[in-house]
Each structure stands twice: as structure tokens, then as C-alpha cells.
């Protein structure tokens, strides 16, 4: 039997979200980030920097890269979900698209929950197992981001290491392997892990304990790709392609469009390293609680990286705003197109995001 999926009833649609303290924390962090990057920057200088930018270059290279990145993520996700059930690339692409759409418009990064719900609904697979593959995917991304940040800092030299988020990325690198190690243990020794969790959950009501045990067991099934073989090699290949090539292209396009000084770029290899460091800093920044769409933390990442490299704050802010806008529009519009073609309303997705996760009720 398959998972019983979230019921989208009227009560779910009325569920208040603005009472959640995490929403207000994200908004507060967004406001604080915008204040920090813009507090001493004349707005007319930001507008002038945007006016000088080559928008054709920015859009021409960034939009196709954003579309391709979702497709590549779908290809990678297929190798993560294959141990659970064969799922078509097209359906995985749709699930990825609606997940990014919800992340851009709904608080608390509910897109990860929604795409698990969407895929479970469309395929009849186990929702908790699908969510396990999403967690594994996020851990892989964190490791890739932090490795890329460390390599970029080493290649760019001392000035790059002065960036706030760049330093944070290096400090967080050892911590990135902690959840990865935890997932490996859960994959290969689920019994002992579940027994420990259930021992800790003894004070909870029996029904809640059964719910945790059942979903944790099915969650471990979603980690089957860790077993190795061809799936693991393809996962690594797609991860490298997503981050080092396709994901970095919009950053490169942004840097080229703003024609940064030779002291910042200078050579093609340095352009690549700066693009990697920008992408890594954004990857670290979006892990911080923020308003939907990662506004604020995105711009903080650009300022934190470019300021130590000698770029003035007005240009850094303008670059961060335009690159973010292209990202937000590309992913949001792509998600709405998928919804339109699939006959699903956005209200269904937001109702699904009110659930903690797809779950079993057998």
C-alpha cells in the first residue's frame, strides 16, 4: 500500500501561517540583511550601476542556465528515487519546478515538503521515503557548496578569505559531513538508529511514537542511493555539473554584464573562481532563515564576497539585486507554467505546505 497523502480540506487552507515565529524570524533576518548591505549606499549609485549593466548578457545566459539546472536536478533526483520506484524524468522535473516555486513564494522553505507531496501524489510512492531522498539531496548540495567555497578561496588568494560568508563556509565545512555521516548510518544500520530514537521518544504518546517509527523506517528507504554503484557515480556527476558549470553560469553572466574592474577579474580563470565563490556564498546564505525567495540574504552574499575583492558596495548591491531578480523570475515562472500544464492550483500546493510531511496512515 502507498502513503496516505495530505488531505487538502478547508481547515488546511485556513491554517494561519503568520503566527509561526519562524516566519517572523525570517522576515527580521531579511530586513537586517537589506539594512546591512544598503545602509551606507546611495540609491542613485545603485541605479546608475544597474543602468550601465549589459542586461542582454545577463538574461541571455542566465535564464537558460536556470531552466537547465532544474532539469539536471531532476536527472540527479531520478538516481536518488530509483531505489524506491522508477519515476520518469518529466515528472521529477515538474516536482522540482513546483518545489522551487513554493520556496520563492511561501515561508519556511516549504517547497521541499511540497515536492515530496507532489511526487508521492503523482506516483503513489511512499511519501516519507521520497522525503528521505530530498534530505539526501540537500546534504549533497551543502557539501558541494562548502567544498566549492573552500577551493575558490584558496585559488583567489587572501583577499577572498576576508569575506564574511566565505569564512563561514570554511568553518562550516567539517560540520557538513556530520549530517552526511548520520544519513549513512541510518541507511546501513537503520535498526539501531530507530531503536535509539524510539528509546528517546518513550515519554511521547504511543500513537505518536508509532508514527515516528514508521516514517523513520520509510525515510531510511529513501537513502538507498547511498549503496553505491552506477547510481552513486551519476549522482556525483550531476552534482558537479549543477554546481561547477550550470549553476555558476548566471554568476559569471552577472559579473561580465557589470564589467567589473580588471583587479577583480583580470583573467578567465579568475572569473571562474569569483563565480564559484559567489555561488558558494549564495548557497550558504540561502540556508539562513529568510523571507520567501531568499531576498536579502542573496544580496548579503554578493556584498560579503565582492567587497573584499575591491568592488564598491553600490555595484555589489546592484549586481546582487539583478542576478537575484533573474533567478527569482526564472524559477517562479517555470513553476507556474508546470502548474498550468498539470492542472494543479497554487492553493493546493500551499495547503500541502501546511503539513509537516507526507505520511503513512495505514
Image (cartoon, helix red, strand yellow):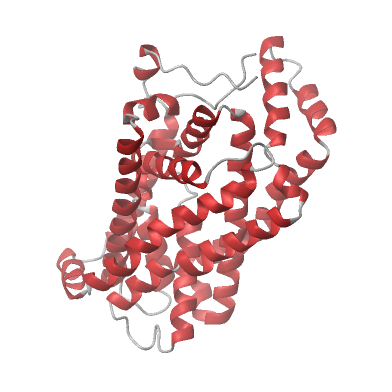
| Nearest the eye: 318 or 100 | 100
Q: Is residue 243 left or right of residue 79?
A: left
As displayed, is residue 258 above or below residue 110?
Answer: below
Q: Residue furthest top?
A: 206
User: Is residue 291 in view from this perspective?
Assistant: no
Q: Is residue 19 left or right of residue 184?
A: left
- Which residue is found at the position 72% from the left and 56% from the top? 230
Q: How many marks?
A: 0
- Which residue is found at the position 58% from the left and 42% from the top? 134
As displayed, is residue 339 above or below residue 177?
Answer: above
User: Is residue 9 in view from this perspective?
Assistant: yes
| Nearest the eye: 14 or 225 | 225
- Which residue is found at the position 20% from the left and 69% from the top? 50
- Which residue is found at the position 38% from the left and 56% from the top? 67
Residue 22 is drawn in which quadrant? top left
Query: Residue 173: where, in percent of width, then height?
Result: 64, 60
Query: Residue 207: where, in percent of width, then height?
Result: 68, 11
Quarter occupied by the C terminus: top right
Q: Is residue 362 left or right of residue 101?
A: right
| Nearest the eye: 198 or 40 | 198
As displayed, is residue 290 above or below residue 169?
Answer: above
Query: Residue 305: where, in percent of width, then height?
Result: 43, 69
Query: Residue 195: where, in percent of width, then height?
Result: 82, 26
Q: Is residue 71 left or right of residue 254?
A: right
Amino acid at each position: 500500500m502507498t502513503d496516505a497523502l495530505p488531505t487538502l480540506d478547508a481547515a488546511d487552507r485556513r491554517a494561519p501561517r503568520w503566527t509561526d515565529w519562524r516566519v517572523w524570524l525570517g522576515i527580521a533576518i531579511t530586513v537586517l540583511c537589506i539594512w546591512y548591505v544598503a545602509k551606507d549606499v546611495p540609491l542613485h549609485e545603485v541605479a546608475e550601476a544597474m543602468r550601465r549593466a549589459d542586461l542582454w548578457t545577463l538574461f541571455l545566459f542566465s535564464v537558460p542556465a536556470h531552466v537547465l539546472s532544474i532539469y539536471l536536478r531532476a536527472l540527479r533526483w531520478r538516481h536518488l528515487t530509483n531505489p524506491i520506484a522508477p519515476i520518469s524524468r518529466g515528472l521529477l522535473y515538474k516536482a522540482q519546478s513546483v518545489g522551487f516555486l513554493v520556496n520563492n513564494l511561501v515561508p519556511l522553505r516549504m517547497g521541499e515538503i511540497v515536492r515530496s507531496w507532489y511526487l508521492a501524489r503523482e506516483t503513489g510512492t511512499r511519501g516519507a521515503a521520497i522525503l528521505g531522498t530530498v534530505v539526501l539531496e540537500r546534504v549533497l548540495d551543502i557539501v558541494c557548496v562548502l567544498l566549492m567555497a573552500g577551493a575558490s578561496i584558496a585559488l583567489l588568494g587572501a583577499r577572498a578569505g576576508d569575506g564574511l560568508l566565505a569564512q563561514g563556509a570554511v568553518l562550516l565545512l567539517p560540520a557538513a559531513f556530520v549530517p552526511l555521516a548520520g544519513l549513512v548510518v541510518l541507511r546501513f544500520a537503520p535498526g539501531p538508529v530507530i531503536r535509539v530514537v524510539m528509546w528517546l521518544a518513550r515519554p511521547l504518546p504511543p500513537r505518536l511514537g508509532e508514527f515516528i517509527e514508521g516514517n523513520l523506517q520509510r525515510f531510511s528507504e529513501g537513502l538507498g542511493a547511498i549503496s553505491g554503484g552506477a547510481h552513486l557515480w551519476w549522482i556525483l556527476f550531476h552534482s558537479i555539473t549543477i554546481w561547477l558549470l550550470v549553476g555558476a553560469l548566471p554568476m559569471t553572466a552577472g559579473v561580465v554584464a557589470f564589467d567589473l574592474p580588471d583587479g577583480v577579474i583580470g583573467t578567465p580563470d579568475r572569473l571562474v573562481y569569483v563565480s564559484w565563490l559567489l555561488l558558494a556564498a549564495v548557497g550558504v546564505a540561502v540556508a539562513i532563515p529568510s523571507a520567501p525567495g531568499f531576498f536579502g540574504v542573496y544580496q548579503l552574499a554578493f556584498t560579503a564576497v565582492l567587497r573584499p575583492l575591491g568592488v564598491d558596495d553600490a555595484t555589489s548591491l546592484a549586481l546582487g539585486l539583478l542576478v537575484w531578480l533573474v533567478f527569482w523570475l526564472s524559477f517562479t515562472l517555470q513553476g507556474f507554467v508546470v502548474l498550468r500544464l498539470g492542472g494543479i492550483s497554487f492553493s493546493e500546493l500551499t495547503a500541502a505546505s501546511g503539513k509537516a510531511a507526507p505520511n503513512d496512515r495505514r
